[in-house]
Amino acid sequence: MSEELIIKHCSPTLAGIKIANLFNCDCHSHEELNVTIRMLNHRLFAKGLLIMPVKYFGNKALIYVFRPKLLRAYLKDERVKQILRENGYDTDDIQKCMKRIISRLQNGSFPHEIGIFLGYPPEDVQGFIDNNGQNFKICGHWKVYGDEQKCDNYFKQCEKCTRCYLDSYRSGNTIERLTVAV
């Protein structure tokens, strides 16, 4: 897994404007990928970023890049807690929440509440669950059921961030330099 791949898929999280991103990458060796992730975590943890593989399948891995501090704060929102409780989560313990979402991902399903762990607005996560992914207002980085203008502006901000981060990385800036401390 290259640093450029992380920047391509996770710039808003690196910039501190998004709680988390999730992406697939090639993985021909679990051991090599785990070594790469440990090295990246060693370099980026002080900035408040954590990277973890949450699922291996074939020659691919699903990678979760997140801001634990931002996630903890988000999980305190009552609407977020309600969605998680309705899906069997112990909302008083972030570690248990993380174990449950990882377990659900590893068991072959793609749980709709994953949007919570990516920082999506709770009304959009609940809307997706209630509508089985249909009847959304707009579709960008996720399907929007709530405030479409706010989300559309946010999507544009994320896209601009990704373009700027990729350009900056390709011009010689390091992933450490691009990762904002939060």
Image (spheres, grey):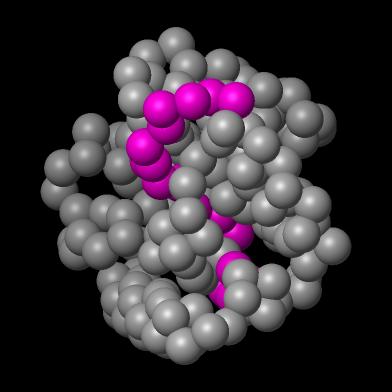
**Residue 70 image position (x, y, % from top left):** 71, 59
Q: Is 10 on the left-hand or right-hand side of 94?
A: left
Residue found at the far top of this picture: 107
What residue is shown at x 61% (from left), y 76% (from top)? Answer: 174
Front in this rendered view, residue 2 or 16: 2
Q: Is residue 111 visible?
A: no
What residue is shown at x 68% (from left), y 79% (from top)? Answer: 177
**Residue 54 image position (x, y, % from top left):** 54, 29
Residue 175, compared with residue 90, is above or below; it is below
Residue found at the far right of this picture: 46
Q: Is 27 on the left-hand or right-hand side of 95?
A: left
**Residue 29 image position (x, y, % from top left):** 49, 25
Quarter location, residue 53: top right
Q: Is 77 on the left-hand or right-hand side of 117?
A: right
Residue found at the far left of this picture: 135
Q: How many marks?
A: 0
**Part of the protein shown in magenta:** 14-31
Residue 48, compared with residue 103, is above or below; it is below
Residue 22 among magenta residues: yes
Front in this rendered view, residue 52 or 68: 52
Q: Is 33 on the left-hand or right-hand side of 35?
A: left
What residue is shown at x 58% (from left), y 83% (from top)? Answer: 173
Quarter location, residue 90: top right
Residue 118, compared with residue 161, is above or below; it is above
Q: Is residue 172 visible?
A: yes
Residue 179 among magenta residues: no
Q: Quadrant of the C terminus?
A: bottom right
**Residue 9 image position (x, y, % from top left):** 41, 60
Quarter location, residue 111: top left
Front in this rendered view, residue 26 or 142: 26
What residue is shown at x 40% (from left), y 65% (from top)? Answer: 8
